[in-house]
Image: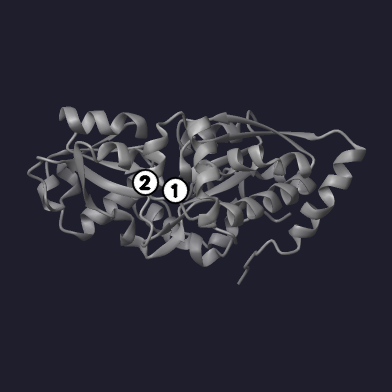
Amino acid sequence: MIRRTFSGLAVVASLAPAIALGQSAAVVRISTNPIDSGAEVYYAQDLGLFAKAGIDAQIQPGKNGAAIAAAVAANAIDIGYSDLGSLAKAHSRGIDFAIVAPAAMWVSYAPVNALMVAKDSPVHSARDLNGKTVAVPGLGTGADYTVRDWLAANGADLTTMKFIELSYAAMPAALAAGRIDAAHVAEPFIAVAKQNARVLASADDVLGKAYLRTVWFANGAWAKAHPDLIAKFAAVMRETAHWANDKRNYPKSAAILVKYAQIDPSVVGAMTRVVYGESLDPRLLQPEIDSNAKYGGFTTFPAEDLLSKH
């Protein structure tokens, strides 16, 4: 059983300032979804952690995990943020991706995703969504399959339902206007949606009370060619996760999130904050891979197969 805690990589981070002084920073092109779950790289940037590690982080927003995975596969991006579903499906098709660091976890005590319906909706159970339209952030992604898993486990007939792709930002308005019947919403948009919508279920609990939903990953060939950068990036993410998980730092991380996600500060103050993974334990990766294999039409595989071998 492989369990990566990155403890040894902390040494790299501690030596990085001295190394960076002697050479120019290495450019690393990073793409993420600018929401709390994908915000670690923004925190690291504003805290100066990338600079200390000798990394010139060039961060750009991405639409969803599938779109970011396509950019990484095409070498347009070096390191991306993605749900495990997109990566598992790509792996099943022979695309060489390597997970280099954990990102956001699902933990039942801090629900940062929710299946939501309008406040006046007649929908009160999974079965009530039969024949209805459900929005997910990306078709064929972990969020999509998690919703399907929860619906099926609670008696819904998936064959009668329509699933559409909609950005998180567009979901609250679509629910309020009645254009969709339900949506799998992520923070900070849950807090926004609650003005006109309510939580139907914490659908992610269907896979367990604690597991990794999203990760940082690279093209396998790029990861093998840049083991030093992968090690530095992993060390920075571990340090950032430790910082961001400390509730005493919530006001500081909220200010950074407002800056990059361009959302109302009052919304950030009202929302549930993400818990970030601090180790790449395959046992925390496996639930998402198994779920995606079920609905994605491929055979499941050990989570270790997706871990960077640097």
Label 1 sits on a secondary structure element that is: helix
| Along the viewing direction, whichever of 201 and 109 lies nearer the viewer | 109
| Along the viewing direction, whichever of 251 and 194 lies nearer the viewer | 251
Q: Nearer the viewer, mark 1 or mark 2?
A: 2
Residue for point 69% across, 61% down: 6
C-alpha distance separating marks 1 and 2 = 8 Å
190 displayed left or right of 59? left
- The answer, for residue 167, to whether it is visible in the render is no
Label 1: few (<14), some (14–19) or many (≥20) C-alpha neighbours in 10 Å: many
Q: Quadrant of the N terminus?
A: bottom right
Residue for point 61% across, 52% down: 101
Residue type at mark 2: give it.
Ala
Label 2: few (<14), some (14–19) or many (≥20) C-alpha neighbours in 10 Å: many
User: Percent position (x, y) of residue 298?
Assistant: 42, 52
Please name the residue that numbered disc 2 is placed on: 143
Label 1 with label 2: CB-CB less than 8 Å: yes
User: Height in image: 285 above or below 255?
Assistant: below
> Residue 38, labelled with which disc?
none
